[in-house]
Image (cartoon, helix red, strand yellow):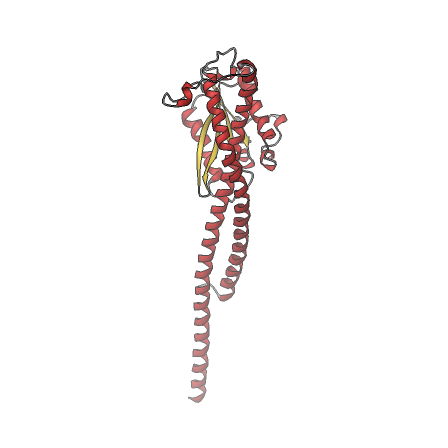
Amino acid sequence: MANLKEIKNRITSIASTMQITSAMKMVSAAKLRRAQDAITQMRPYAEKLQEILVNVSGTLDLSENAYAEERDVNKILIIAVSSNRGLCGGFNNNITKRVNHLLLNDYKGKNVSILTIGKKVNDVFKHSNRNIRPEELGGAEEVFNDLTFERAAEYAQFAMNQFKKGEFDKVVIVYNQFKNAAVQEIITEQLLPIATQVDDTSTSNSADYIFEPSKEEIIVDLIPKTLKLQLFKALLDSYASEHGARMTAMHKATDNAADLKKNLTLEYNKARQAAITNEILEIVGGAEALNG
């Protein structure tokens, strides 16, 4: 059994850790509220715009919509989205696992490049020959240091330009989709080429839109904006998921620390009582020997 000083030092250390994890939980909870509001407000708009884009793209030929061109898939770009910081459970590790799964299974034998958004996933793949980091996009961690539509649009524009040039035949996004504070789902979402079909049962498939001023002029703005918005939505999802995962992880860490502190306190009291009992026995033994 450890001595009293060692146990007491451990109890003090755990108490300090509990203060840190509890504070981090409260900070993440505050940030989660704002991030959750942002994604819940954005999602209906982005999904409706995506629905319109799919419907309209089905009526265009390739000369009008180069972003819907279907090719033999040999060159693929994976946009992997993680966080800049850890202490959020398996949030970042799950992204890495999904990307590796795609490399070893779905895209085995293909020419795959990885564009990272977020420091943690960039640290994993930065020494890989698959990793690409154009200078104009800056560091992988910069997006989440200042998450705005303009920063997301730069990444989307890069992917659109490379697809249009034929550098990539397919572009997918791998990110954590926010469900609630405790649940995040890993999503592999196709960004390019744009889907030109929707479920036949969907009412949007038969929608007839009136274009003003003209379909061609609207498409020039609609397609790029929708693609940029799709990536921005993925980043907002990932940002909210990060804080949800961190809040949950810190809550569990605080609970585990409290249990460990309780067990150590019990062990400390037992050890202290045993030491007191031994001292009493030694005093009694010594007194009997003197009276002997």
As displayed, is residue 273 above or below residue 284?
Answer: above
Q: Is residue 203 left or right of residue 67?
A: left
Residue in the picture at 46% in, 24% down = 51
Residue at horizontal 44 percent and vertical 57 percent from the top? 259
Image spot of residue 79 (x, y percent): 51, 28
Which residue occupies 45% across, 54% down? 255
**Above/below status of 200 relative to 269:** above
Question: What quarter of the picture does the N terminus occupy?
Answer: bottom left
- Which residue is situated farthest in the left direction here? 201
Q: Position of residue 215 (x, y in %)?
A: 53, 14
Q: Where the C terminus falls, by quadrant?
A: bottom left
Q: Quadrant of residue 201?
A: top left
Q: Is residue 128 at least partly visible in the picture? A: no
Q: For residue 101, say whether it is visible.
A: yes
Q: Where residue 210 sits in the image (x, y, percent)?
A: 50, 17
Q: How many marks?
A: 0
Please say if 30 is above or below 167: below
Whole-percent x and y of residue 43? 49, 32
